Image (cartoon, rainbow, N blue to C red):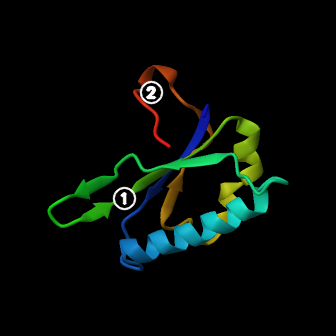
Amino acid sequence: MKYYIEVTLMKTDDFSPYELWSRIYTQLHIAFAEIKDTHDKVNIGVSFPQYRFNAEKSVGFLGEKFRIFAQSQADLEKLNIQKWFDRLTDYLHITSIREVPVNKITCYAI
């Protein structure tokens, strides 16, 4: 994956983090369904750079950021994530499309 968009959740009294993540997942699901190819595949990846797992409590925490990755800038433009998060703009900060800094990649996970 060579390009990405970073989305940061902003703190709000309107929604709990759980409610906001739920709304985000709903919109992502719809957005991905709209861009699937003829084989029902989506060439987009998602990462959670602040993810942490508390083994003692057996619970994971996604953090306040996620990144949407694609092989090309055109794939991210086609996704048009601004459209899908339009109703959430007061609660999210969405960056423009950026190139993945190759020198910072330490590993991959699937």
Q: How many marks?
A: 2
Q: Using the image as rendered, state which of residue 94 and residue 109 is in the foreground.
A: 109
Which residue shows up at 61% across the image and 63% down it?
28
Numbered tag placed on residue 62 in the rendering = 1
Residue 38: x %, y % from top left: 85, 54
The vertical placement of 94 against 72, above or below, is below
Residue 50: x %, y % from top left: 34, 49
Comes first in the chain, label 2 or label 1: 1
The vertical placement of 6 against 26, above or below, is above
Numbered tag placed on residue 105 in the rendering = 2
Which quarter shows the N terminus? top right
Name the amino acid type tagged 1. Leu
Which residue shows up at 74% across the image and 46% down it?
77
Which residue shows up at 67% across the image and 65% down it?
84
Q: Using the image as rendered, state which of residue 83 and residue 58 is in the foreground.
A: 58
Query: Farthest residue in the bottom direction?
Result: 14
